[in-house]
Image (spheres, rainbow, N blue to C red):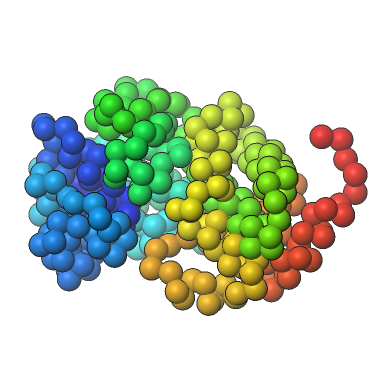
Amino acid sequence: MKITILGGGAMATACSVLLAEQPNHSVSIWARNPNYAAQMQQNRENQRLLPGIKLPDAITITSDIAAAVADTDMIVVSVPTAFLRDALTEHRDALTAPVPIVSVLKGIENETLLRPSEIITEVLGNDRVVVLAGPSHAEEIARRLPASVVAASADHRLAVQVQDVFSTDRFRVYTNEDVVGVELGGALKNVLAIAVGIGDGLGFGDNAKSALMTRGLVEMTRFGAAFGADANTLFGLAGIGDLITTCVSGFSRNRHVGERLGKGETLDQILGSMSAVAEGVRTTRSVQQLAEKFNIDMPITREVFEVLFENKNAEAATDSLMCRPPKVE
C-alpha cells in the first residue's frame, strides 16, 4: 500500500523508516519547504532533525502535496499541532480522499482548545482518524529499538487496520477505543515533562522527580475524567508510559525546555535556540485555560503555566507546590 506522511520532522521521518520496513509499502513524505524536501530526497537523510538515519529507497520526499497524496491508501499526519489547522486548510483540496488518517500529534490547539483528531475532522470532514500514541521517541524508533504504542479509534476495525500496518518485530501496537484519553495523555505528559525538567535544572533529585511524575499522573487522570476519558487509558502506554519516557529521556524536548528554565534562561531564549517544536509550551496554555473553565484542580500545571507565561521564578513555583495545605493522598 502507499502511505503518505504529512510533515518533515523527526517523528515523520521515523514513521517513514518504520513503515518502509515492510516490502509491500511505499512511503511518501510531504515537507512544506521545497529546499528541505529536496535535500532530504538527495541526501537520503533528515540531517537537521534526525541525523544519522538513512532513508530507504521506498521513501520519496517531495514538497508537492498533490504528488505526495496521489493514489495514497493512508495518510499519517505529523505536523505540529500549532501549525496543523493552517497546513490542512491550505491543502484541503488535495486531501479529499476518504482514506484513513493517522495522527501522531500530541497537543491541544490554543485558540479552539481542540485535540488534533478534532481539528483533522473539522477541517477535512474526514472522521476516519486513528490516534497513534505512547512512549515513542523518534530517535529510537528510527534505530529499530523496541517500542510499544496504542492505536486509538472509536472504530475498532480502523484501529486494527492501523495496528496491522504499523506493527513490526520491534514496534508493538495495541488497540484502544478511548481516543479522548489517548490524546489527553499525550498532551498533558508534555506539560509535566516541563515541570520535571525545571526540577532537573534546579538540581533536585530523584525524590522530587518521582513525586512530580506521580502527582502529575493524578492531574492527568483528573483532567481526563472531566472530559470522559477512561482512567485505565491513562494508566497505560498513552498515559503513564509516555509520561515516564518524556520525563526521563535525554531526547525529550519538553524536559529540555524545563531544565533550561530551571537554570534561569528565559522562554524566549530557549525557544529561539531550538530547531524542533516543544509541544508542551503551547499545550500548557490550553490545559490551564480548560482547567480554569471547568474548575479542575491542576496545581502542577498551574505552576508550569506561571513559570512559562507569567515570569514566576522556578524556586517560587517549587515553594508554592511544597507549601500547599496538607491533604490526604
Which one is in front, 117 or 54? Answer: 54
Q: Is residue 34 left or right of residue 118?
A: left
User: Looking at the picture, does residue 279 appear above or below residue 226?
Assistant: below
- Work out whether residue 307 or residue 297 is closer to the camera in this orientation and state it: 307
Q: Is residue 24 left or right of residue 92?
A: left
Q: Is residue 297 visible to the viewer in this orientation of the structure?
A: yes
In the displayed structure image, the side of residue 24 where residue 238 appears, left or right:
right
The residue that appears at 61% across and 50% down in the rendered structure is 192
How many numbered badges does the structure rendering display?
A: 0
* Res. 33 image quadrant: bottom left
- How far across and how far down the image is residue 279, in percent? 48, 57
Quadrant assignment for the N terminus: top left
Q: Quadrant of the C terminus?
A: top right
Residue 38: image location, x then y, percent: 13, 65
For this rendering, which residue is in front, 57 or 119?
A: 57
Q: At 90% across and 44% down in the image, what residue appears?
A: 326
Up-down: is 105 above or below 237? below
**Residue 167 placement (x, y as % from top left):** 29, 28
Q: Position of residue 235 (x, y in %)?
A: 59, 30
Work out whether residue 220 or residue 148 is closer to the camera in this orientation and state it.
Answer: 148
For image coordinates 46% across by 39% down, the residue present is: 135
Looking at this rendering, what residue extends furthest in the right direction?
Answer: 326
Is residue 298 visible in this depiction of the protein? no
Side of 57 relative to 130 (left or right): left
